[in-house]
Amino acid sequence: MLAKKTSKNQLTLPKEIADKFPGIDLFDAEIENNRIVLVPVKITPISATLDSIREKMSKLGISEADISDAISRARKKKK
């Protein structure tokens, strides 16, 4: 399938490809081995991300004290 680059350097994805990503409007563009790679991106509010992290930590039994201890260990100077 061909994708055409416009005079404004925009690419138009073929419908067959775009249809494989319903609800996705953003793609991260990278170059790998002289190829353009598009990775679908879904933006979520920061609060939703933080809530999911806190929920996962709770399920794993990780407390605020555990986090403080880990930070203290990481900040100690190595001998």
Image: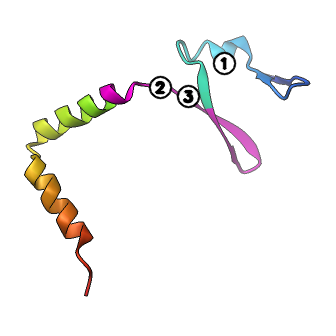
Disc 2 is placed on an element classified as loop
Disc 3 is placed on an element classified as strand
Disc 1 is placed on an element classified as helix
Residue 43's label in the rendered image is 2
Residue 40's label in the rendered image is 3
Give the left or right position of residue 24, taking residue 30 as reference: left
> Image quarter for residue 7?
top right
Image point (53%, 28%), residue name: 41
Outermost residue on the bottom side: it is 79
Question: Mark 3, mark 1: which one is toward the viewer?
Answer: 3
Local crowd size for mark 1, using a 10 Å CA cut-off: few (<14), some (14–19), many (≥20)? few
The kind of residue tagged 1 is Ile
The kind of residue tagged 3 is Pro
Where does the image place residue 19, in percent across and percent down from the top left?
61, 12
Image point (31%, 25%), residue name: 48
Instruction: Give whichever of discs 3 and 1 has the lower sequence position.
Output: 1
Give the left or right position of residue 22, taking residue 78 as reference: right
Which residue has dot 1 on it?
17
Work out how far the residue at label 3 is from the one at label 1, CA to CA, in angstroms: 12 Å
User: What range is drawn magenta here?
Assistant: 28-48
Instruction: Give whichever of discs 1 and 2 has the lower sequence position.
Output: 1
Residue 46 counted in the magenta span: yes
Residue 32 counted in the magenta span: yes
